[in-house]
Amino acid sequence: MIFGIILLALIVLSVMILVSIYNNLVSLRNRVKNSWSQIDVQLKRRHDLIPNLVEIVKGYAKHENDTFVKVTEARAKAMSAGNGSVKEIGAAESELSGSLAKMLLTVESYPELKANQNFLALQEELSSTENRIAFSRQAYNDDTMMYNNKTEMFPSNIVAGMLNFVKADFFVIEDKAEKVAPKISFN
Amino acid sequence: MWELIEQNRRKSKIVFFAMFIVLEALSISIGLSVYYPDGGYWGALAGFALWIIQSMVAYYFGDAIVLHVSQATKVTKESYPVLFNVVEEMKIASSQSYMPEVYVINDEAMNAFATGIRPEKSAICVTVGLLESLNRDELQGVVAHEMSHIINRDVLFMTFAGVMLGSINMIAKGFLYSTMSGNSSRRSRLGSKSAGGAPIFMIISLILAVIAPLLAQIFYFSISRKREYLADATAVRLTRYPEGLASALEKISGTASNLVMYNRITAPMFIINPISLNDESSLFSNSTHPPTHKRIAILRQLQNGGKVSFRDYQKVYTKENGSYKFLPDSALADKGEVPVREAMVATVLGPVTAKPNIRNMTDMIMAASGFLFLPCTCGLKIKVPPTIGKQQVQCPRCGKFLTVPSVTSGINHTGEKTKPVEGVDSSYKRANPDSWESCLCTCGHSIQLSPIFRGRQVVCKKCHAKIQIDYP
């Protein structure tokens, strides 16, 4: 009689534990999905800021044409890669970061441009967007790490294996700007 | 990180009920010492009512009260874009869904605090002095620290702990005061039905009334200090740059005591307690915060070590303070490596010509009389008189034509103090009130100010923004 009660209690306890592990995994996976969409939001924000920036810089630096062309192209590529895999998006966005960095380097030789209030406000927004992309990527990687930990560590890996919780990929944007040397031209 | 939240929620509930029990014990005992046995019920009821009322006031109105006492004004993204962006960056880094409100205190002393029982209704507040003196990395460190308090539900926890402390203090002091004025002895003689019933409770009450506040105080300060270290650990995990917070703390500890609008209750909520800056963390000191130099030392060691996970923070903390494990095991189990990042290259939001490199006396005089220093691409610094009237100048060395930027400032040249007063969108300081000056509105439209104009405010014709005019 008592044995039966103890057995029942153990079963109920294990079910409760399993349920809580499952809920934990679900909530972590949802966090990963959520922080991934955050990255998307910030990347789109950058896409939206770029045309304005290019217009203002063009107003002052009329003959830096191929820099603008590269930026606009890279932007178009990044926007179309938006539906692809994590790796594809990472590659396209790295290229965009690189061409943007080159364009901002050319700004250094135009002091009137650097004094323009609208340009400075836009530059602050752009720099903040770069930070946000970095932080949203960081948050995504943090959440991914927590989720992957749970799917790999005992005892939650049992539940994860049984109920099809797969590991998530980490998101990497390489700083291509460092690998590109700026072109120096003498007027 | 959410394990810390769970732990805080659990601890808050425990504190909540522990407080209830202590409060009831104290009030029942006092009630019984006054009028046995019915006094016990009255005491229990009174204690309960006090507890409920104080908790509700703290929960629903605590934020508004603190913000009001500190004379903080709410600001928008337009007036303080950098601050807003920094807060939003931290919101993203911590995977939060809700953006806190941003407040600014118009005080030159550097300090900051956060309120918010729950993240949906939270606020971060910084002083003007902080915004002017910190660079972006440092500001980010401070904002991250404050957000960590909100995320870890420290505000929730410390509010209830504070209410508990307050209630116990109130009842104990009230009881001791009434015993000392001699009223209760009369009542107890009248009320006691059985000899020796009331006096025992009187003694118990006296002991409790003295001990409970003391214990509660010690308890409150020790958990407050632990919470500060925890917020530091969470903050650097968010920013990945401990040096930012470290140098910010260094700068703040110099001036935090000059803060004007605070009192004994709001003081512990700031990032550095403005009351006791130099207190060592002893049992009986008035210090709710750990000593600043310890916090800075830990942060700098983390920076040198190159890793900022919770496990690394615990390691360095143990080295500094002895083995007091204050982070929960679940946070320490984090398997991954968390590396430090590079320092940020800050954008300066303000006219680049504001701080010219003044090399000699002539330059100084020219700068003072409103000359513009225009750097040409050939390297020559062209000094343009303010009365030039032309839109273009030719560089005397290389012959290149440069446009003269209109004497701009939608933003005051000393930095980000764009909105010192509510109701004004930006401010402009006249360099030469006796000549024509043009001031650029943030929408791009330029406004001409005549030599005889002495008004304090102009309204932009295009976007109707209000611009405050200051005179030297």
Image: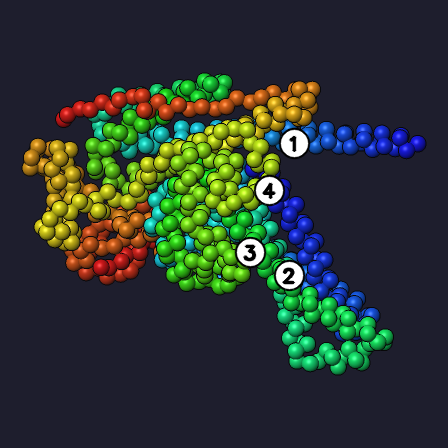
Q: Which residue is mark 1?
A: A24
Type of the residue with mark 4: Ile
Mark in front: 4 vs 2: 4
For marks 4 and 3, give the CA distance.
Answer: 20 Å
Q: Is residue B286 visible?
A: yes
Please tell me whether residue B249 is drawn above or below residue B312 in the rendered image: below
Q: Which residue is mark 2?
A: B54
Type of the residue with mark 1: Asn
Q: Position of residue B167 (x, y in %)?
A: 64, 63
Q: Chain of mark 1?
A: A
Type of the residue with mark 3: Phe
For marks 2 and 1, give the CA distance.
Answer: 35 Å
Q: Chain of mark 3?
A: B
Q: Chain of mark 2?
A: B
Q: Secondary structure at mark 4?
A: helix
For marks 1 and 3, give the CA distance.
Answer: 34 Å
Report the side of A159 relative to B138 (left or right): right
